[in-house]
Image (cartoon, rainbow, N blue to C red):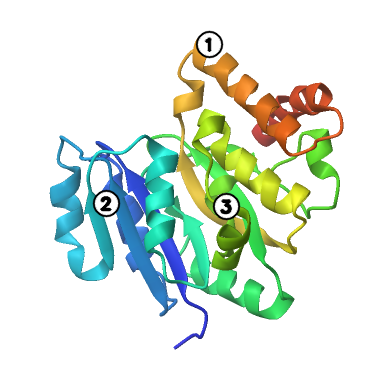
Amino acid sequence: MHDLKISVITVCYNAQSTIEQSILSVISQDYDNIEYIIIDGASSDNTVPIIKKHEKDVQRFISEPDKGIYDAMNKGIALAQGDVIGILNADDFFAGNHVLNDIANAFANNHAEIVYGDLDYIKPGGSIIRKWRTGQYKKGMFNRGWMPPHPTFYCKKTLFEKFGNYSLEFGTAADYELMLRFMHLKQASVYYLQKVLVKMSVGGVSNKNIINRINALLFDLKAMYHNKIIFPPIALLFKPLRKLRQFF
């Protein structure tokens, strides 16, 4: 038994096509001190029956209406009793069975408050279309548009207790704002785990159309100003440009 308890939170809504792959990737981990929490937004498809197939491996499950994905994440955080908390979305899955073991060792061996790693974007069939390789974080990198992949972001529960949860006022940038707050503004100790931790299916709410994309950029800018980025318009310009290297 490992001493460090890791709470993995999956939030979902009408995710019948992907939720089982996410669940299986959690329950097949070779790490033995996991608390698995699923927060469903009152799905109307087959999502809930699929979750209930695996209820013996899920410690906490709620299905009820919510105010969106980040409200659901906050519900999961409120329930979590682990030392470390991470989010695995319903269309994401762990890259292998040893991921949580690696994350636990990274926390234990590096006295870190935050651990993050790399991510692959995949399309149906499993082929990789983008590789997000972040590199080691250094103070000030957020000023140049840098950010880690949120699905690989694991942090001590105490950070939520000290600095707050996901703020709904930042819309689709709530995950970016939280990482910016914890790492850049509050300067929590960080460790980069140089390996692919999560595979993410292509798509996402903020990328569905040009209006959503513009709104996402405005939320990013608001998060930057709120968390004292030095030149937010410049960081906003660099942020999407950094994604280009992920395709090569």
Taking the spot 67% from the left edge, 27% from the top edge, the residue there is: 222
Distance of label 2 from label 3 (alpha carbons)? 30 Å
**Quarter holding residue 242:** top right
Q: Position of residue 212 (x, y in %)?
A: 50, 17
Q: Residues within 10 Å of mark 3 (few under 14, many from 20)?
A: few
Distance of label 1 from label 2 (alpha carbons)? 31 Å
Residue tagged 2: 20
Residue tagged 1: 210
Q: Quadrant of the C terminus?
A: top right
Q: On the picture, is 233 further left or further right than 101?
A: right
- Give yes or no for contact between labels 2 and 3 (Cβ–Cβ under 8 Å): no
Q: Where is residue 103 in the image (x, y as percent from the top left)?
A: 58, 69
Sequence-earlier tag: 1 or 3: 3
Residue tagged 3: 164
Q: Position of residue 207 (x, y in %)?
A: 50, 22
Looking at the rendered structure, the kind of residue marked 2 is: Glu
Disc 2 vs disc 3: which is toward the camera?
Answer: 3
Sequence-earlier tag: 1 or 2: 2
